[in-house]
Image (spheres, coloured by chain):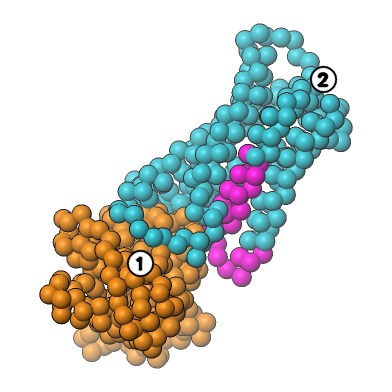
Amino acid sequence: MSEFLSSSLARKYAMALSAFFLIFFLLMHVIINLLSIFSEDAFNIASHFMGTNPLIQFAMQPVLIFGVIFHFVMGFILELKNKKAQGVKYFKDNGAANSTWMSRNMLYSGLAILAFIVLHLIDFWIPELKYKYIDVLPEDPNRYFYELQHKFISPVRVAAYVIAFIFLALHLLHGFQSAFQSMGINNKYTKSIKKIAKIYAIIIPLLFSMIALFHYFNQ
Amino acid sequence: MNLTLKIWRQKGPNDKGQMVDYKVTDISEHMSFLEMIDVLNEQLVEKDKEPVAFDHDCREGICGMCSMYINGEAHGPDRGITTCQLHMRSFKNGDTITIEPFRAASFPVIKDLVVDRMAFERIQQAGGFISVNTSGNTQDANAIPISKHAADQAMDAATCIGCGACVATCKNSSAMLFVAAKVSQYALLPQGQVEATDRVLNMVKQMDDEGFGNCTNTAACEVECPKGISLENIARMNREFLKASL
């Protein structure tokens, strides 16, 4: 078992499985955020449920945090191992001739997403922890929509979010379909999988961007 | 045509090495790329200079020996060919062509454009075979039914000549396409089933021990492979490895 866990293929499976988990999380996240466009009350109810349900708070949230950290740490480990395997660099290397920019720059799109996650946690998660566990303020089921809207007053923050979502799209454009290949799925359905993955990679970041822009223009 | 060549020169494994410029004249567009290097080497010998060391053998795209990284691509700009099948008609008069050895920590340079690809041999020895009974009781291969589709896929995988273009072109120096081709050609046939578990475990372990990088599915290897080995083989190896490990 230890040989399996230390093998290069086990690292691929781990990256792919954590990617699938994060892709599912993004879908859930965007669905809840979309509610804020259509109904203030619906968004508040969903957010209040997510923020107070013990199963989500004390089981799903730690799993999510672990999933995010695991995906990033494993990605960096892979990158370091790959750098070591490269040896001397080419004088001239025409990577664009045989692979996409997205596939060659997962590290950089990943770093941009990591920077965004830090900003996102500072914006929403840390104030939430402060509200609940430091200030111990009384629970207000109607505060969530206002807090969300308030964050998108600043055009700089909105721009930072939209740029981050572009990097998310670039990361997903390669990462989603690549996870299937890593899990050994390459068959007659692969063309369809690639199309669905491409649609997901564009639509989800686009929806996130729309939500940020909607609240900026509807203050 | 007249060309400027930028060629990697390295006296030995411990030499630092550098790119050196050469001018070659009167090159015919009908020449193969290796013949053009032959012309350069003749010119160098006439000037009492050290010729450029490079690997070559069959010169017809079968042996997998020629291994040059030309203008930033393994085996040059054309597709589905080895360096020996690349012709000078792919270039224009006055072009500057960069020529480097296949790069990877697991493919150390021996001299100039010659690299040590014995790592591939060791991976092959770890499991890229079937143990055949040669006592005279061997079953006639034609008596074992194999579907046309499986036979074709196995044959496609078996066309890998082990040139190392997949490693050279991969930004991670991953050998997954080579190992996957060797695993697949047996995994698809009934003769390969007996040793299937040991084969994939041992070959992947040897691949990791040799220090090759991790595949990130850029698919550059598939594009540059002179034999068109498909990424489907990597997916098959991933399945085989998972099956063997569980």
* Amino acid type at image mark 2: Asn
- Answer left or right for A22 relative to A69: right
- Answer left or right for B51 relative to A70: left
Where disc 2 sits, the SS reads: loop
Q: Nearer the viewer, mark 1 or mark 2?
A: 1
Q: Which span is picked out in magenta?
A: A164-192
* Amino acid type at image mark 1: Thr
Residue B31 lies in the magenta stretch: no
> Residue B85: x, y in percent?
37, 83
Q: Mark 1 sits on what residue?
A: B98
Up-down relation of residue B2 to residue A124 (above or below):
below
Q: Quadrant of the C terminus of chain A?
A: top right
Q: Colour of chain A?
A: cyan
Q: Colour of chain B?
A: orange
Where disc 1 sits, the SS reads: strand
Q: Chain of mark 1?
A: B
Q: Residue at x 65, y 34 (%)?
A: A160
Secondary structure character of the magenta stretch overall? helix
